[in-house]
Amino acid sequence: MGNDEILLKVEHLCQYFRAGRKEFKAVDDISFEVKRGEVFGLVGESGCGKTTTGRAIVKLYDITSGNIYFKGKRVGAGTRSYEKMIESARKETREKIKLLRSKSGENSAEISALRARMREVISQQKQSIGEARRDNRRVGTEKRNLITQIQMIFQDPIASLDPRMTVRDIIAEGLVISGIRDQAYINEKVYEILEVVGLVREHADRYPHEFSGGQRQRIGIARAVIMQPEMIIADEPISALDVSVQAQVINLLNDLRARFGLTILFIAHDLSVVKYFSDRIGVMYCGKLVEIASSEELFHRPLHPYTKSLLSAIPLPDPHYEKKRIRKTYNPLAEHDYSMCLPSMREIAPEHFVYCNDEEEERYKRQC
């Protein structure tokens, strides 16, 4: 790891999608921080919201609610939480006025005071909504450069590369968009980065269909690294590759991390890979973060039952162990009772956070 400087801060991120009249919560109120120079692993089963989180950070989606800060500056903001506070203030004021009238009749002074407080809350929230919308719309040079410092490696190396563009054009596209017109400089940069990721200059004039899956993923990595980012979001970069190629790509990412001082948000569902590659790990389930800890801490002392279930599913190349391995299942209705006390993310041990309520917090602390 590098140091304790916070490079990326995700604060109460919500990403909802609407299909007809129904709204689906892909990511529901998650918060985490990524320190400069570290690899933060984000794991969970398919559909838990990992990829949506990564896409929201690089602004492929307009987030529903919450804030995203990069290098201390807000680069993404949602308005739903502010809108809900306005609705809540209006509803609460109506109920209080109704109760006041039922008890003591018309009391204009108290009613006026309640309405004044409501207007103050609404004014504050509308101001926050305006600031959030301005932050999302503002596309100045400084903010554009800031967003460019976060690059993404996509999961599918076939779908993420334009089949009608040569490798040269694919890798150089970011440089062209950023305003560079010197073709000799662009070519030299493309050749240089091709060699860095394990390809050769002759590959620059070929098309994506002429490469294997591992080579295509290297092209995707080159496209991200050529922009000289400070942070890379790697969205399951090895899940579509053969096992032998997976190790090569992971080692390449490790080399690039050391060479360029990269910070990486590594999204995956293979816990064995995440353990090898990550400094800290966040576990997601149904759109929520349920546990955050260092890689060593999470594997040696998992606390949340879903984390234990994930770890029990990791296969090992040992027939004797596999014969005795007990697969733990996770049933949230049986594991948790949140009818009396609602859960929240709590620090159970130093730098070890778990999504739990009061009773679970006490139990987890005893396990530590």
Image: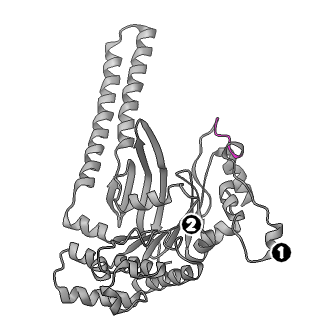
Give the percent coordinates (x, y) of residue 254.
50, 82
Quarter where residue 153 is shown: bottom left
**Range of residues picked out in magenta:** 335-340
- Where 248 sits versus 162, above or below? below
As for residue 60 lying within the magenta part, the answer is no
The number of callouts visible is 2
**Residue 191 falls left or right of residue 298:** left
The image position of residue 240, as x and y in percent, is: 52, 71
The type of residue carrying mark 1 is His
x, y percentage for residue 120? 30, 33
For label 2, count other residues whose C-alpha is less than 10 Å away and answer few (under 14), some (14-19) or many (20+): many
Q: Quadrant of residue 37?
A: bottom left
Magenta segment includes 336: yes
> How much space separates mark 1 and mark 2, taking CA atoms?
29 Å
The quarter of the picture where residue 118 lies is top left
Classify 41 as above or below 111. Answer: below
* Label 2: element kind: strand
As drawn, 87 above or below 125: above
- The secondary structure that most of the magenta stretch takes on is loop
Few, some or many residues within 10 Å of mark 1 (<14, 14–19, 20+): few
Amino acid type, mark 2: Ile
User: Is 15 left, or right, of 140 in this rendering?
Assistant: right
As drawn, the label of residue 320 is 1
Identify the residue shown where x is 23% and y is 51%: 134
Q: Which residue is pictured at 47% across the width and 63% down the height? A: 33
On-image quarter of the C terminus: bottom right
What residue is disc 2 on? 281
Q: Is residue 331 above or below residue 245?
A: above
Q: Secondary structure at mark 1?
A: helix
Q: Nearer the viewer, residue 13 or 73?
A: 13
The image shows residue 74 at horizontal and vertical percentages of: 32, 58
